[in-house]
Amino acid sequence: MWAHVPAGDAGRMATTHPHQHLREHDTASLGAVVTAGVILVGLLVGAAVLVAQVVDVVVWSFTSA
């Protein structure tokens, strides 16, 4: 399709913005590990709160009867 259009002509599609420099893999990996750790700790705290609420309701149901 574009065989007759030489490279660099105005009719050819090209990227007009420069490439962004990527971070080093070590920095990106460390950020991913820290983020995953924060998410896991948040899930554990949420699960602990949920279990505590269920235990409170069960204890309340036995003591109020």
Image (spheres, rainbow, N blue to C red):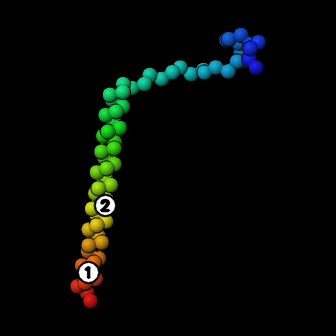
Compared with 42, 32 (above or below) is: above
Quarter of the image containing the C terminus? Answer: bottom left
Q: Secondary structure at mark 2?
A: helix
The residue type indicated by label 2 comes to: Ala
Q: Bin the neighbour count of mark 1 within 10 Å (Cα to Cα): few under 14, some 14-19, many 20 and up.
A: few
Q: Circles 1 and 2: CB distance less than 8 Å? A: no
Compared with 32, 10 (above or below) is: above
Q: Quadrant of residue 2?
A: top right
- The location of residue 15, given as percent across then percent down, is 60, 21
CA distance separating discs 1 and 2 = 20 Å
Residue 31 is tagged as none
Q: Residue at x 32, y 39 (%)?
A: 33
- The location of residue 28, given as percent across then percent down, is 36, 31
Tell me which label, 1 or 2, sits earlier in the chain.
2
- Location of mark 2 (residue): 47
Quarter of the image containing the N terminus? Answer: top right
Q: Bin the neighbour count of mark 2 within 10 Å (Cα to Cα): few under 14, some 14-19, many 20 and up.
A: few
- The location of residue 47, given as percent across then percent down, is 31, 61
Compared with 39, 16 (above or below) is: above
Q: Is residue 28 left or right of residue 8?
A: left
Q: Residue at x 29, y 70 (%)?
A: 53
- Location of mark 1 (residue): 60
**Residue that extends furthest to the bottom in the rendered view of this protein:** 65
Q: Is residue 27 left or right of residue 63?
A: right
Query: Count of labels shown?
Result: 2
Q: Residue at x 34, y 33 (%)?
A: 29
The residue type indicated by label 1 comes to: Trp
